[in-house]
Amino acid sequence: MSKNIFARIAAGEVPAKIVYEDDRAVAFRDINPQAPVHVLVIPRKEIARIGEARQDDTALLGHLLWVAAEVARREGIANTGYRLVINNGPHAGESVPHLHIHVLGGRAMGWPPG
Ligand code: AMP
């Protein structure tokens, strides 16, 4: 049984604006976008956060990064640039316990992040 909101989105139980999906990953628009393009890439597999990933998840983790780059191409931000973010734990502001990569673009961003 699916437990968290992102697992439920991946299962098709909760609606989302999906921009990409395959057998291992789903990408959908963030409900509270922080940039003109703000997409979340998640694995269908329930991994709570990057720190919970196992060594045998490495192929999946690589696939998620490829999906993030593919989403950036499809969203038209590949040439202007974009940022990939993974928040892990309380100090990083993680709020949903299902691994997700933020794909942010469409505007210039500051560094260091807040
Ligand atoms: P994080 O703070 O890294 O855990 O990011 C969680 C992100 O999920 C936030 O940017 C939220 O706006 C986003 N979010 C939460 N619920 C939903 C939802 N149902 N659909 C799309 N994005 C969501």
Image (tube, helix red, strand yellow):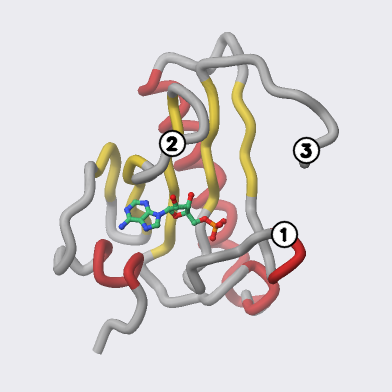
Residue 39 vs 109, above or below: the answer is: below
For the residues labelled 2 and 3, the Cα–Cα distance comes to: 16 Å
Q: Nearer the viewer, residue 95 or 45?
A: 95
| Dot 2 or dot 1, earlier in sequence | 2
- Which quarter of the picture shows residue 28? top left
Q: Is residue 112 left or right of residue 57?
A: right
Residue found at x 82% / y 28% = 111
User: Which secondary structure lies at badge 1?
Assistant: helix
Label 3 CB-ligand 1 distance < 8 A: no
**Residue type (three-letter) at the residue carrying disc 2:** Pro
Residue 3 x, y percent position in the rendering = 33, 83
Residue lying farthest bottom? 1
Label 2 CB-ligand 1 distance < 8 A: yes
For the residues labelled 3 and 1, the Cα–Cα distance comes to: 10 Å
Q: Which mark is residue 70?
A: none
| Dot 3 or dot 1, earlier in sequence | 1
User: Which secondary structure lies at badge 3?
Assistant: loop
**Residue type (three-letter) at the residue carrying disc 1:** Ala
Q: Which residue is mark 1?
A: 92
Q: Which residue is mark 3?
A: 113
Residue 97 vs 87, above or below: the answer is: below
